[in-house]
Amino acid sequence: MKIARIPEANGRFEVIDVDIPEPGPGQVRVKVHACGVCHSDSLTVMGAMGNDFPRAPGHEVAGEIDAVGDGVSAWSTGDRVGVGWFGGCCFTCEPCRRGDFISCENGQVPGISYDGGYAEYMLAPAEALARIPDDLSDADAAPLLCAGITTFNALRASVARPGDLVAILGVGGLGHLGIQYAAKMGLEVVAIARGEEKGPLAKELGAHHYIDSTASDVGEELTKRGGAQVVLATVTVPDAMTPALGGLKPRGQLVVVGASADPLKVPPFALIPGSTAVQGHASGTSQDSQDTLRFSALTGVRPTIETLPLAEAQTAYDRMMSGDARFRMVLTMG
Ligand SMILES: [Zn+2]
Ligand SMILES: [Zn+2]
């Protein structure tokens, strides 16, 4: 089979032939049809989470089960399945024993802990699988397994309820999905991005309002509209998040899903008067992925994607890293 892997830290992709792996106990083999290219794949390339090399990234995997290992009872050959960031858990650590599997202390991530979906086949533990609905294509399902679940699950876990005003900060890979989910959840949606250009697109995606953050004060604009119950921050520049704090309603939340190592500067005075909160959100489990896929099929939420064949993994990765992709790159297998 073909696999696109990184031979060494900060290396470039090599696309080579390797043996098709056999599933061990508790695992299935997935024949990959599509795999999304995510900014977090750069963690694999850098070895930032301590992964071995060579390693194939890929945690937005859509395909079908091709072989089933011993002890797997709930899944069969031919089942259409996805694998997202949640790539397995230990079932024995304290968070697992409390049922909080996404917080597993020994949690596995496809493309970090084991070779991910930049390949024609991959192995995955059964607990990492999400069912793909019939009326969702593999290429559309793939980005929903990371970018999709991240925004969908963060919104449904937030304090926002139908009819509330919610702001989606950023109209990019995560934000273009967050806008759609928020609108389909019955929220009043304010999209926020830099410049006027993204306004029409944001409205096409379902936003009711648009704020150009370069032309006005985001906090004041949100306050004029009554304040936001939740601001979902999908951008990766923490300094762009801070102004939105001033636009939260009392008890509102700034929910942070845009991954960055830079500090988020929050003046205590921005939190105390309205008892507001800054809340992080880790994507979710395979069942949350399955819920995301189901909700997307039901309501028509779809990612905007550009596809390239597996052999062009480097080009797809470079295009994603440059920020030029509109909005998610997806690798397809021949
Ligand atoms: Zn991701
Ligand atoms: Zn655990």
Image (cartoon, grey):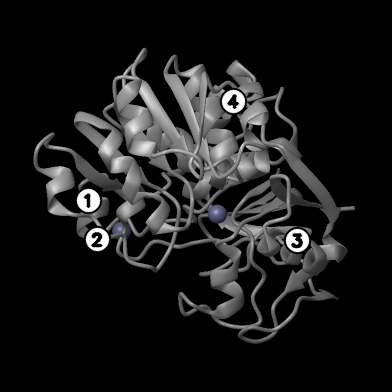
Q: Which mark is residue 93?
A: 2
For the question of whether residue 183 can be seen, the reply is yes
Mark 4 to mark 2 CA distance (whole Å): 32 Å
Indicate left or right for 300 with 156 as reference: right
Instruction: Name the kind of residue labelled 1 in the image.
Output: Arg
Question: Quick one: 47 or 252, which is closer to the camera?
Answer: 252
Instruction: Name the kind of residue labelled 2 in the image.
Output: Cys
Cβ–Cβ below 8 Å for labels 1 and 2? yes
Residue 13 is situated, as x and y percent measured from the top left of the image, at 76, 76
Q: Nearer the viewer, mark 4 or mark 2?
A: 4
Cβ–Cβ below 8 Å for labels 4 and 2? no
Of labels 1 and 3, earlier in sequence is 1
Quarter of the rendering containing residue 46: bottom right
Quarter of the rendering containing residue 199: top right
Residue at which label 1 appears: 97
Q: Nearer the viewer, mark 4 or mark 1?
A: 4
Residue at which label 3 appears: 319
Q: Going 27% across and 46% down the picture, which residue do you hit?
A: 279
Q: Nearer the viewer, mark 1 or mark 3?
A: 3
What secondary structure is marked by label 3? helix
The answer to whether mark 1 is within 8 Å of ligand 2 is yes
What secondary structure is marked by label 1? helix
Residue 40 is situated, as x and y percent measured from the top left of the image, at 55, 62
What secondary structure is marked by label 4? helix
Mark 4 to mark 1 CA distance (whole Å): 30 Å
Mark 4 to mark 3 CA distance (whole Å): 26 Å
